[in-house]
Amino acid sequence: MEKSRTNPVGLLDEAVAAANSMRRDELLFSYKGILYPTTVCSPENFKAFESFETRKDDVILAGYPKSGEYILVFL
């Protein structure tokens, strides 16, 4: 069975295309005083994270690519 994979470059291209069609004042939104890009984040996701509960058997994988950014994966 083949797993579907998300193409990060395709997601970035879609976000850039969406941003190009938006007015400047629509590009960012504020959540608890911090600005986030509208094309890749949503206030609904942040609200859902507030009630997110981990379980005792959850595993967190963190990787640090050469770009200096980090990735968190919840299993």
Image (cartoon, grey):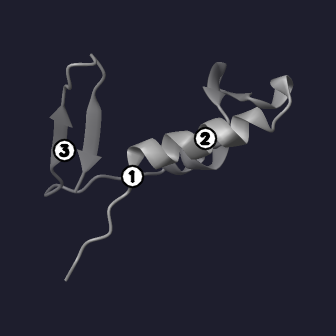
Mark toward the start of the polypeptide (2 vs 3): 2
> At numbered mark 1, what does the secondary structure look like: helix, strand or loop?
loop
Q: Which residue is mark 1?
A: 7
Whole-number angstrom distance, CA of label 3 to CA of label 1: 22 Å
Instruction: Find residue 54 and report its horizontal and vertical position in percent.
Output: 29, 52
In the displayed structure image, the side of residue 65 where residue 45 appears, left or right? right
Mark toward the start of the polypeptide (3 vs 1): 1
Mark toward the start of the polypeptide (1 vs 2): 1
Instruction: Find residue 75 and report its horizontal and vertical position in percent.
Output: 22, 57
Q: Are marks 1 and 2 in contact (CB under 8 Å)?
A: no
Q: Residues within 10 Å of mark 1 (few under 14, many from 20)?
A: few
Residue at 36 percent of width and 53 percent of height: 53
Whole-number angstrom distance, CA of label 2 to CA of label 3: 27 Å
Whole-number angstrom distance, CA of label 1 to CA of label 2: 13 Å
> Is 58 located above or below residue 32 in the figure?
below
Q: Which residue is mark 2?
A: 15
Can see residue 73?
yes
Question: What type is the residue that disc 3 sits on?
Answer: Ile
Q: Which mark is residue 60?
A: 3
Can see residue 39?
no
Residue at 32 percent of width and 61 percent of height: 5
